[in-house]
Amino acid sequence: MSFFLNQMVIGIQLGSQYVLVALGLTLIFGILDISHFAHGHMYMIGAYLLYIVMVLGGVNYWLALVICMAALSIAGVVVERAVYRPLRGQPHINSFIAAIGLILVLETLVRGIQPDALRVPKPIDKNFSFLGINMEVQRLIVIVGAIVFIILLQVFIKRTRLGTAIEAMSQDREGAALVGINVNRMSALTFAIATALAAVAAVFMAPLAFVSPEMGSVLVLKAFVIVVIGGLGSMKGAILGGYLLGILEALAIAYISSAYKDVFAFGVLIIILAIWPTGIFGGRD
Amino acid sequence: MTTLLAVEALTKRFGGLVAVNKVDFEISSGSITAIIGPNGAGKTTLFNLIGGSIRPDEGKVTLEGRDITGWKPFSVARGGITRTFQTTALFEELPVWVNLVIGHRMRTRSGLFDALLYTPRARREKKETTREVMEVLGFTGLAEYADMPAGTLPQEAQKRLAIAVALIGKPKLVLLDEPTGGVGLEETDGIITLIDKIRASGVTVCVIEHKMRMIMNLADYIIALNFGIKIADGDPQSVCQDPSVIEAYLGECIA
Amino acid sequence: MKKYGKWAFYLLLIVIVALIPLYLNRSKSGKYTIQVLTMAMIWAIATLSLNLILGYTGQASLAHGAFLGIGAYAFGIFVERVGINIWPALILASLITAFLGMLVGLPSLRTKGPYFAIVTLCFNVIVFKVFENWTWLSGGLRGQKVTMPSYLEARWARYYVVLGFLILAILIERQIVKSLLGSSFIAIRSNENLSEAVGINSFRTKLLSFTVSCFMVGLAGGLFAMEKGSLDYTITNYMYSFYLLIYLLIGGAATLAGPVVGTVGLYFLLDKIKGIGEWRYFIFGLILIVVIIYFPRGIVGGAKQFWEWAKKKYYRTGEVLE
Amino acid sequence: MRLKTIIVLTVALLMLTLGFASCGDGGGDGESVVVKIGLNAPLSGVAAGYGQDIQAGIEMAINEINDDGGIKIGDTTYTFELKSSDDGMVPEQALANANQFVLEEGINIIWDPTANTIGPQMGINTKAGEEFLIMAYTSVPLYAQGANPLMITMPPPFSIYLPEWIKLSMGSGWMKVGMLQTTGAYGELWGSTFEKAWTGAGGEVVAKAPADYYTTTDYTANLTTVLAANPDVLFIGGPSDPTALVIEQARGLGFKGGFIVIDQAKLDDIADITGMEALEGAIGVLPVENGADFWPAMTDFTKMYEDEYGERVTWETAICYTGFMILSKAMEAAQSVDDVEAIRAGFADGDVSVTSGDVYPVGFEGIDDETGALLMPGTSTMVVDGVFVPGEPIEWWKL
């Protein structure tokens, strides 16, 4: 029983990073109708920023979190302005191609500057035990931190004027434009928030693994699958889907086969979509 | 006159809201039937139920005595009912004539092997399609636009094209959802004439319309809906004088 | 008259392409170019297959990398382990791919748009993982060897085989998209709900398009195995699905020339800039972004638009002159 | 206006591309004949560092030979030039690169350091008129078993370490192993070879949860699964960085036992990341610098490498350096730089087989002429009390 519980906690921790990245993706998709496949590479840039700020700059971890969020959201706005805005009104698949181009550019650039994988120290390098679960404090930070930022995002969306404007736009883009919401400003804001969330995920996860140019490519694939399973544009769906995939993976490793864990996890997702063709929480076509 | 379409106790609920509530009516062949009612009365939902894009919770739809309840849209179309949509739906980036070719697809049977080998059937059907397209272009007065992408046509021509696409499949019944919506007053007459012509060619018409004056002159039979319930039906004069209709329309009908 | 001119142009084009190996085969480096062209044409067949389902039917399949691999392995296994002659093996491999495509299409084509793209991508990941881990199937480290008969030993011989299949693939696609069936495909791409309302069974039509598309990509896979002489699990990588998508959209979706131009052009470019190492991906990425922003309908689509624009301009000045 | 921008941009882009493309060609100096050697390796992506280590070894050897005036065959002096091509570990790409080397560059010796790309090239390297010699850097045993008449394999096959590793492990009283090596064909081959030897020696495999070391960043789920079966020792390994992560995370979960680390992972690189304390009880291949205990030339070589590249040397670099030196001797013995069959035969000739660790950083005792495997000993190690305790070099060809 303790083993099962342990595996569930690991699944939730895996899921936490998926949720943070998937939330950004689903916001961008819901509001701008863009398949921002380069989102994982923004996450990667976030991890490098953390390295620069914290390891090279000697800044405190929590302050570094804020700096990375701010810096990466600016990067997100630049990407939106330079790559995606010229594509507005084009077929959906075109933004996907642009995103692949962006992935190639970012990954090659980073590897060209720093070919070796880097390490970021943990802010609290300790372990803790609870109910027979033994794990690093950093993992607790990931789990709790993800929940905090999910709540912050919900508060922002539901309680602030900008947030409600974003929500209105994700539900009805043309209607939002009609009632005088500035579409350009909203897309920039959306990208800023989404990439800030990616920065959060990167800052939380970086101390647990390596900072490397390809760290975002597998993550974004999973995040995208999550967004689709939950229903494109649905934040509820992204949260549920993220934790679901994390737990599925952890359980597949424990009880089925670690080599075929992706086969199992992705197979379940195909079945879910065959039953709910527009994701668990509806979403749009 | 024989009954073409019969709707019995048709009901559809969305959550707590009953969009269409136990509606009964019949459409006789060769007639023009109008469905009227204020916004949100359930008119378009009724069309969607008949057309098969949503499934009814209760009730029955029969076409010439055949039960077509819950059929998929394409089966309903092949069964003999085609429709237009409230927000004009067209194959926008395709030329007008291709729109019509697609509309005629359900009358042709060429498949993969006909396409690959260009069989006699493919040849025959291509010829037949061309002939039909020319005829419908003429019938609806769209010949001058034949090569233009449908989305670039003027609003009124788009409405006529939508009707043409529905007609070319040779339906028994066409459902027209606000065929004159968003069209200027002078151009409305052109569409009324077209609807008359359609009836004259032997196709039964059922139309959702807001412009009461137009309906009074055009329709043989009117069904009035409000809050998903049929509040009145009959010939134009009697429906117009029905107190519940007057109440629903705040007297607008008198005009 | 105009019609004959067009056919004459195509004929001339085929003759030129058919003559290329005669010139190239004289030197060793020319032989390498023949090989690059052959590979480019194989990829072009795969891109054409994607064009049918994505360009004409509007369903973005991201599983074509998997189907390419399945076709290639089916061919390899038939030839090497079962011992069938290569030509029936090629047809069988394509049929098997088409059949699997149909099985995959049954659940996945119930979804639309991005949902379909992700379902097919999931399928591709699954196939990739299975081939990676199931070494009996994939042949493990050494991969699956595919022995070719001696008459296909020379590079130019394979060039002509592949060229023949490429022309066949273009013809097949042309026949389909110009037919009444093709109009059903295009209708679904344009407006699926309206297609249903005018009596087109969109699910069956999409399934047919997907199956035919898988047949073609299976064929490309078989030719791939024939050209390479060996296979390994990386051929099922979903990166290839992305590459096909790039070739198609940069070349121009929903045109017949676009997939060929895009694939041959980009494949050649990537081969030529191999010497600059990793930075080639940087350049490639930049090209993708710039082309997709300035030529949203791809190279061929853009050229067509330019042609229309120039024609209009010419006629207008013509009118003024009169 | 807009059209103009488009045209300008396109032209600029094209010129940029062509400019880069033409950079690749450099001219030779014409004083002597230049022999080109091909390298087919991952130079981009996750394994780029590995490819660069190989490249460095060959480059160092080439520079040294060229600085000494090249090799003399008859009256002609030959110098070398390395042509590298990125295959990203994709066999299809490796095949295309090999063809390009042979047909466009006239190369007939190709170095390849990844097991999955070597296999397919063995299918094309004997084709008449397009022969090339594969210098295969791979420890996969089946390649060292005479798989191809025109192939030389370099590091010792990994199976030779197993008896000693199992002895070290069971000597510490560890009988229960949990397996968490990398997935894919290479990992699976290692795993099955190990499992057979382990159970054959009376050990028990209590749990298996291999992971894809190239894409996984978090091994906790795998580790808890394996650790739930209470193993004494973990069989792990893939590229060094993720292997270090596995060790770190295993210790984080409270695992106190030992590790058996497959040869792809380098214990010294791992120690840099985890520290020696976490590595206690790790069994694997001896770190390259400790090779100086057996082969004196290693000391100088290590220093030379560090001066030039600013990093610590790897086995890949040292072995490829030595391998290239042996290759040049084989060419002299064969009296040819392009007759690949003669060169292959030349490896077995007099002068070539007597070179040893006194001259080159890695010990070498000739070639197994049957199989084409260079006879370089492998050495294992175990971390005891924070120190790499070396074993004796395993002269596997004598076993």
Image: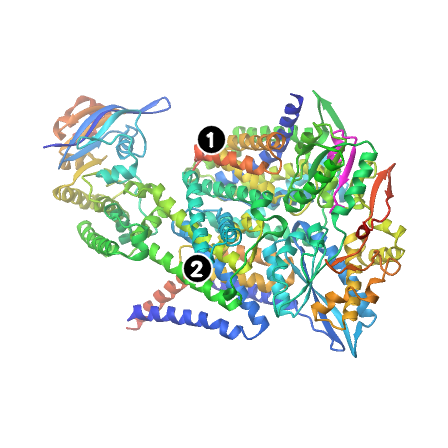
Picture colour scheme:
rainbow
Q: Can residue B249 be seen?
A: no
Query: Could you tell me residue A120's position as x and y percent?
Result: 74, 40
Along the viewing direction, whichever of D309 and A24 lies nearer the viewer: D309
Residue C258 marker? 2
Answer with left or right where residue A279 lies relative to residue D341.
left
Q: Which chain carries label 1?
A: A
Q: Mark 2 lies on which chain?
A: C
Along the viewing direction, whichever of D60 and B19 lies nearer the viewer: D60
Q: Are marks 2 and 1 on the same chain?
A: no
**Discs 2/1, front:** 2
Instruction: Identify residue for label 1.
Output: A281
Numbered disc total: 2
Q: Is residue A237 on the magenta stretch?
A: no
Q: Is residue D350 above or below residue A185?
A: below
Query: Could you tell me residue D371's position as x and y percent?
Result: 72, 58
Judging from the image, what secondary structure is the residue with disc 1 in?
Answer: loop
Residue at mark 2 to residue at mark 1: CA–CA distance = 38 Å
Task: Report the magenta residues as a range.
Answer: D248-265
Which image quadrant for residue A191? Answer: top right
Under mark 2, the amino acid is: Gly
Query: Could you tell me residue C190's position as x and y percent?
Result: 36, 47
